Image (cartoon, rainbow, N blue to C red):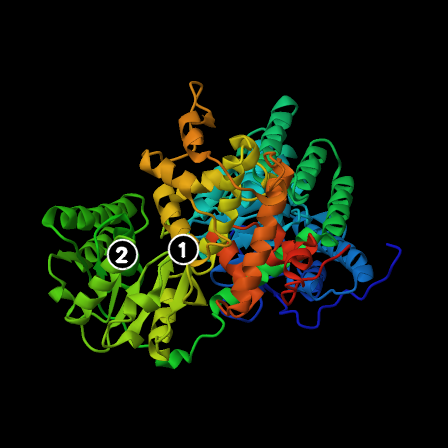
Amino acid sequence: MSTKVALDFPDEVVTHAYVRYAQLPGVDGPVALITLDNGHDHTRPNTFGPAGLRELLAAVDEIETHTPPVAAVAVTGKPFIFCVGADLAFRSSLTDPDQIRPAIEALGELGHRALRRVGEGRLGNRKVPTFALVNGAAMGGGLELALHCDYRAFSAGIPVVALPEVFLGLVPGWGGTQLLPNLVGAEAAVTLAIENPLNTNRTLKGPQAAKLGLADILLEPADFLEEALAWVGRVLRGLGEQARDDGEASRGRGLSDGIADPRAARPVVARGQAWADALARGQALADARLHGSAPAAYRALELMALAETADREAGYAAETTALADLAVSDELAASLYAFDLTQKRARKPVGGPDRSLARPVTKVGVVGAGLMAGQLALLFAQRLEVPVVLTDLDQARLDRGVGYVHQEIENLRSRGRVSADKANRLRALVTGSLTKDAFADADLVIEAVFEDLKVKKAVLGELEAVVRPDALLLTNTSALSVSEMAAGLAHPERVAGLHFFNPVAVLPLVEVVRAAKTDDASVATTLAVAKSLGKNAVLVKDAPAFVVNRLLTRFLGEVLGAIEAGTPVAEADTALDPLGLPMSPLTLLTLVGPPVALHVAETLHEAFPDRFRDPAGLARVVAAGKTSIYTTGPDGTQVVDEEAAALARGSSAGFGAAAGSGLAPSGDEVRSSALAALAQEIRLLLDEGVVAEAADVDLCMILGAGWPFHLGGITPYLDRAGVSEKIAGRRFSPPGVATVH
């Protein structure tokens, strides 16, 4: 390195490497056990920063001088946590572009040196076996530490195993791209390092990781460390017996419970065409998801291609170079901003009242028994473990709704997600009633009925007649005014919005809507309930369609407007591909459902007719019963449904760059118009005070719409692209976003 840097991070929470020595039966010499522990409980996982890596090196130095010499080295973690990788705050602390590259190069080299020193087991002039006893969450550099070791035992209770670097705009840069494919094969390596991160950062559990080939043995969690050390002893005794047999001396003197070298049981890694085919699959996955919009996945694939033939030194040097290149990219700065939002801001909603004002919730009512109501009832029962009562208009609908919830609980039991006893208790919590009198003692009632303001107002009026004066009344409306719903009530102060996104069990965002008269206690209770449900809440002011649906509808309206103006469906739908969005606009329309999208579009057109176009084309699609603009072709591929496309088309008075030109907008013009519309709408959201800051818009879009991490949310992207200043007159400039050129 040409530039010297001080590789220190003053705010690092140091993960210490504590060494103790265990004497195992029948093993000559002690086993050195390194325990990683940052001194915090399991809510603060072990991570590696510069100081932590130096402690790991110091631990091996100590082991090397131990008397008597050790027979092996093993590494494990504190309870529930092995290690979750690099301390990302180290990169966030670097603000001088001239220091970023040399600092990351130095950190890459230090990580390689520390993990390699542990895993290779070279103590002076001798080599000892090394073992990773993975007792808990193992991600990124933590998993790479395990990969460096000769042998790996995994706990069946591990909740998370992952290499998430590509999701964050990096590559597995401490040996992961080189070691993983040579252990489990390129096909499985692509799944773990490319496919899973691109699939909204999917993770594996311990048994899944073992099945993929990451572990030599899978042990139950109750006595994991004790059983893992016993396994280490058996391996060492087996290695000792093998060594004596190979030397043709002292045959038969080893203990009878020694086992064969676990490495002999690992499958042979397929190379050549199989390796190339796996990388081609990874390339196709990256193209389908990113369309070339972010470099990390492609750099990771290049490194895995190198791993087939390169020696360790060359492979590790290439990883360090890739880390340094990506460290100065806009994508990484954006990803770290997005990561910080989801890890910190999402856990403590901005603008919320004192949490001590929240009232307890011991019983929940759900008005309606359709699919959304059933999903809500299941979530409340699962997470709050309180009685949940559904109501509907007739017994048949009610039975279907309660039956849906009970069947979903049975599905959880059959998949091993809950025990039989837990399933029975959950089923007993969910009941139905044809009258709302069943809500008389409920602390919270949420309505999930048809999206019609008159219907919802009537439901809330009926509820107020039967519930306690302090019961919280919530609406799951996606676009309607909560203030208008509550306007005719005697106690409008206890009405709030709790807008879930479909599917309820999967999407983490809820928009907590404060209406004109909602009091602090009701807001505090709603926020507390959202947290108990495992959701990330953003507090929003009552406004048409709130945040996510308002922006997505404006965005989708530009695409549908282009189609009406004559742009071919496929060209309009793929216009935004260069952004690397999780799905195209018309695929999103299919997922949401045209009727739901139409309802939101009509609400917003009525509220803001100057910006939200009349959704006449979409209305024709819905009236015809079409569920998508696409259909399935004879060969099983997705093709445009020409009938639906014809319904979506119509005369247009003008659109974006094509207005007045008589020409259908090109894909580039569609993209420019869509981004301009988003910039305008976000500025208006902020000026209206719908959310506290631009960061809340970003959080909503990341958690509610899957806006990619590598774009850092929507406002940093619009700033970097120059759209903010061009359209809204100034940058959004959310705090903490560094743009590197």
Q: Is residue 210 left or right of residue 58?
A: left
Q: Secondary structure at mark 1?
A: helix
Q: Pointer 2: what residue?
A: 448
276 vs 588: above or below: above
Residue type highlighted by circle 1: Glu
Kindly indicate the quadrant of the structure image that contains residue 646: top left
Is residue 702 visible in this depiction of the protein? yes
| Residue 105: x %, y % from top left | 78, 54
Q: Residue at x 68, y 48 (%)?
A: 173
Residue type highlighted by circle 2: Ala
User: How many residues crowd around disc 1 within 10 Å: few (fewer than 14), some, or many (20 or more)?
Assistant: some
| Residue 282: x %, y % from top left | 60, 34
Quadrant of the drawing holding the N terminus: bottom right
Q: Is residue 29 left or right of residue 569?
A: right
Q: Is residue 266 left or right of residue 620?
A: right
Is residue 83 visible in this depiction of the protein? no
Q: Residue at x 57, y 52 (%)?
A: 677
| Residue 619: x %, y % from top left | 37, 41
Q: Secondary structure at mark 2?
A: loop
User: How many residues crowd around disc 2 within 10 Å: few (fewer than 14), some, or many (20 or more)?
Assistant: many
Q: Residue furthest right?
A: 2
Q: Residue at x 54, y 51 (%)?
A: 707
Q: Pointer 1: what residue?
A: 606
497 vs 130: above or below: below
